[in-house]
Amino acid sequence: MHPTDIIAPSKTLEIDALAKKLLSEGKDVINFTVGEPDFPTPKNIVDKAIEALQKGYTKYTDSNGIPQLREAISKYLKEKKNVEYTPDEIVVSNGGKQALFSAFSSVLCENDEVLMFSPLWVSYIPQVILTRAKPVVVQTKFENGFVPTKEEILSHITDKTKVILVNSPNNPTGGIYDRETLTTISQIANERNIFVISDEVYDDLVYDGKHISLYGLVKEELLIYVNAFSKSHAMTGWRVGYTATKNKEIKKRISKIQSHVSSNINTPAQYAAIEACNTDNSYMIQEFRKRRDLILKMAQEFGLEYVEPKGAFYLFFKVSGNDEEFCKELLSEKLVATVPGSAFEMPGFVRISFATSIEKIEEGMRRIREFLEHKH
Ligand code: PLP
């Protein structure tokens, strides 16, 4: 069987499409499925793309990304995140999504195993299957804050384990891994020479505590760091993400993959991303924090059970009964679109995105409350 016959289309995009269809029919839908900031891309960033177009920067570039962008990313990572990669260690890709696929493709051979922790983002399993490797899902526990324990990790490691995949801040839980957990994961990987792919695309969106990168914990030749401007700078449609690694062999492979699969990413978007490196996004983070606090206040009032989200823009709460049924009924009865936990390999939960206005959050949560009261 071909790998594409095993994978399903992205469930989140499917539900989002259904919600948008209902909206286009004039239905008053509150769409809590969206995985992107509702802010416009900052104007100074947009202006740089326009300027690039007007200057005629519309041709192929270095397929790794223009040197000025890789320099800007290198400086931005060092100054803002304390993560140090030279421009030569960075490859710019079409969003975090392609960066992740290149990272997987650069290390995995057929039947290699990739350890990943559920609940997990919808594209990880399909991407690993497409490389013909094998996803090994470690189910984390609600009681442990959806963070894997050492025993859970060790009991899934085999001699085929090639990669441990980590996503903190996490989609769909909004959780951030503490230093102890990250140290445990790093020690396990370092001792056994297992690669770590660290998806840190939500690292700017943290409301309590501090994001801790795996950079500096995992041995440098084993770490493939992935980030993107999509969530941090409201640039989802621009498709600018990147991998960074100090492993020269892996970097060479990622460059080759980029050059044959895509060539460079959209040229004007690269000029826009240089500007993003110098754009303050703290106003977005403040607004997300306000929304998170509101949604948690409402969720507490009507007794939802969840692990408090400290980052990203999601609330992942427990439901009684079948989560897919819950989401379907909530959409048809109350016109509130949410994503079932099964889409993230964690049935029995539902994800709400609070990347939407305060008014919509208030109205959507009011409808969820009515729905729950009516159900029970
Ligand atoms: N990683 C996680 C955890 C995500 O949630 C997403 C997008 O939803 C991505 C990566 C990919 O982001 P991009 O839009 O930059 O491809």
Image (spheres, rainbow, N blue to C red):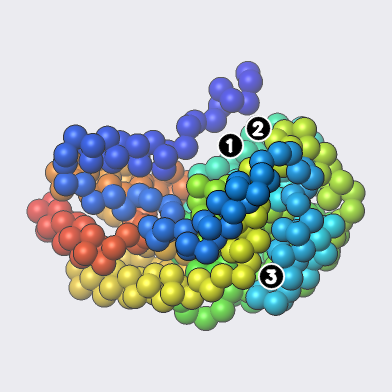
Label 1 or label 3, whichever comes before in sequence order:
3
Quick one: which residue is furthest to the left in this view? 374
User: For residue 360, which quarter of the picture?
Assistant: bottom left
Is residue 186 toward the left or the right of residue 275 in the image? right
Quick one: which residue is furthest to the bottom in this view? 209
Q: Amino acid at mark 2?
A: Leu
Tell me, yes or no, if residue 137 can be seen here. Answer: no
Q: Amino acid at mark 1?
A: Pro
Determine whether the residue tagged by mark 2 lies in a helix, strand or loop. helix
Residue at mark 2:
130
- CB contact under 8 Å: marks 2 and 1: yes
Measured in 3D between alpha carbons, the distance from the residue under mark 3 to the one under mark 2, in whole angstroms, is: 32 Å
Tell me, yes or no, if residue 220 can be seen here. Answer: yes
Location of residue 248 with respect to 304 vertically, above or below: above
Residue at mark 1:
126
Measured in 3D between alpha carbons, the distance from the residue under mark 1 to the one under mark 3, in whole angstroms, is: 31 Å
Q: Report x, y in % for residue 110.
A: 77, 32
Location of residue 113 with respect to 184 vertically, above or below: above
* Mark seen at residue 76: 3
Question: From the image, which quarter does the C terminus lie in?
Answer: bottom left
- Residue at horizontal 62%, vertical 58%? 273
Q: Report x, y in % for residue 258.
A: 75, 40
- Residue at horizontal 56%, vertical 22%? 5
- Residue at horizontal 20%, vertical 73%? 301
Q: Nearer the viewer, residue 201 or 69?
A: 69
Q: Report x, y in % for residue 99.
A: 67, 48
Q: Is mark 2 within 8 Å of ligand 1?
A: no
Q: Amino acid at mark 3?
A: Tyr
Q: Badge 3, how many Cα within 10 Å: few under 14, some, many 20+?
A: some
Q: Is mark 1 within 8 Å of ligand 1?
A: no
Measured in 3D between alpha carbons, the distance from the residue under mark 2 to the one under mark 1, in whole angstroms, is: 6 Å
Q: Badge 2, how many Cα within 10 Å: few under 14, some, many 20+?
A: some
